[in-house]
Image (spheres, rainbow, N blue to C red):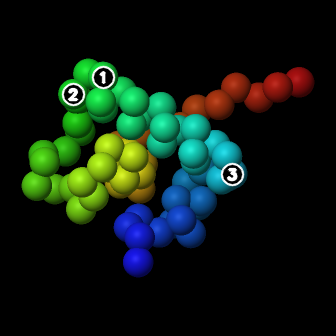
Amino acid sequence: MLYPSIDKLLNIVDSKYKLVHVAAMRSKQMLEKNHYQLDENEYQNKRSIGRALEELEKGLIEVKFKETK
């Protein structure tokens, strides 16, 4: 089973598309700047995309989107 669960993540982000966008952006930041919000041993995932989803689930990433008119 994948961690974190998509059901938990969709309670934080209202759309699968936004979830993918946020996770991809954070994953790219991790790889480019080598900046992680948790210690290496606190992550359950080895890949940056999974780690980005973990940070989102733990509330370490605040999601803000501009509303279009």
Other-residue count near label 2 (Cα within 10 Å), few / some / many at <14 / 14–19 / ≥20: few
Q: Amino acid at mark 1?
A: Glu
The number of numbered badges drawn on the structure is 3
Left or right for 15, reference 42: right
Res 55 visible: no
Mark 2 and 1 residues: CB-CB less than 8 Å, in contact? Answer: yes
Mark 1–mark 3 Cα distance, whole angstroms, equals 26 Å
Res 2 visible: yes
In the image, residue 9 above or below residue 28: below
Q: Which residue is mark 1?
A: 32
Mark 2–mark 1 Cα distance, whole angstroms, equals 6 Å
The image quadrant where one finds the N terminus is bottom left
Q: Which residue is mark 2?
A: 34
Q: Which residue is mark 3?
A: 15
Q: Amino acid at mark 2?
A: Asn
Residue drawn where x is 56% and y is 69% of the image? 7
Q: Earlier in the sequence, mark 1 or mark 3?
A: 3
**Image quadrant in which you'd find residue 60:** top left
Left or right for 48, reference 2: left
Q: Label 2's element? A: loop
Other-residue count near label 3 (Cα within 10 Å), few / some / many at <14 / 14–19 / ≥20: few
